Image (tube, helix red, strand yellow):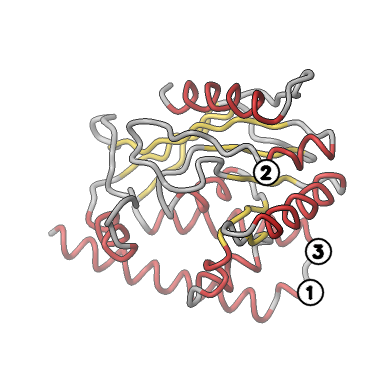
Amino acid sequence: MIWLRACWRLLRVAAHIGTGLAIVLLRFARLSPDQRGLRVQAWSMALLGHFGVSLQVRGQPPISGPVLLVANHLSWLDIPVLHAARHCRFVSKADVKGWPLIGLLATAAGTLYIERSTRRDALRVVHQMADALRAGEVLAVFPEGTTGDGRTLLPFHANLLQAALSAQAPVQPVGLRFVDQATGAACYAPSYTGDETLLGSVWRTLCAPPIVALLHYGPPEQPQGQNRRDWSQHLHSSVDSLRQK
């Protein structure tokens, strides 16, 4: 029964990705940015459903920008979870752009790409982010820089916070965790860390019983005179608290 359920979910996910590609290729060019955002949000919510994941939101997602969301990072599933609650433009590692199918969808959703190995590219992305925030957009980053195991929160990298400081935009902490729908216990099926493969993580999620993605938004924060390093440490504490509630 588990295999049958997983295969049925996989078929639905594949069909849904195909639908998303068709929308991007045939319709996105004619849509306004707001219409694209709503499309991405609706598509992401449906994708979660095909994976057997429901969404529970606590706190208030941003109604409008400018705001920079900072969240903990557990899985490849984090991005559609955040998109399903409120469309935002993510900052992602540059190699995602070259992933088959996923790269096209990520680019259509407004992703900003960063080559993390070069300081010059980080500065370019910070300037790009600051411009987007000044234009009133909602951006999102994972300051850990990689996926964690969900048990502890990795240290935050402070560099990208410079965009919010430069644009004088608030930062909103977000905590995310996955739980078993039946028991409420922590669920690590979608995890993607260490030696785990993406395909293995996807298949494990497809095989899992129903999962709830708990997304907890804290109130937007201003730096209040803090430099980006001190602000990063404060936001780390806020996200750590939110993800455990």
Residue at the spot 52% in from the left edge and 29% down from the top edge: 216
Residue at the spot 79% in from the left edge and 19% down from the top edge: 225
Q: Name the residue under label 1.
A: 30
Q: What element carries label 1?
A: helix
The nearer-to-camera label among 2 and 3 is 2
Contact check, label 2 and label 3, Cβ < 8 Å: no
Inspect the image, locate mark 1, and give the three-letter code of the amino acid beneath it.
Arg
* Mark closest to the chain's N terminus, 2 or 3: 3
Q: Is mark 3 on a helix, strand or loop?
A: loop
Task: Give residue 210's quadrant in the image.
Answer: top left
Inspect the image, locate mark 3, and give the three-letter code of the amino acid beneath it.
Ser
- The spot of residue 56 in percent (x, y) is 47, 35
Report the front residue among 74 and 119: 119
Report the front residue among 61 and 242: 242
- The spot of residue 150 in percent (x, y) is 35, 36
The nearer-to-camera label among 1 and 2 is 2
**Gap between marks 1 and 3 measured at Cα:** 7 Å
**Gap between marks 1 and 2 measured at Cα:** 32 Å
Q: Mark 2 points at which residue?
A: 160
- The spot of residue 236 in percent (x, y) is 54, 27
Report the front residue among 160 and 207: 160
Q: Quadrant of the N terminus?
A: bottom left
Crowding at dot 3, Cα within 10 Å, few <14 / some 14-19 / many 20+, comes out as: few
Report the front residue among 112 and 82: 112
Q: Mark 3 points at which residue?
A: 32
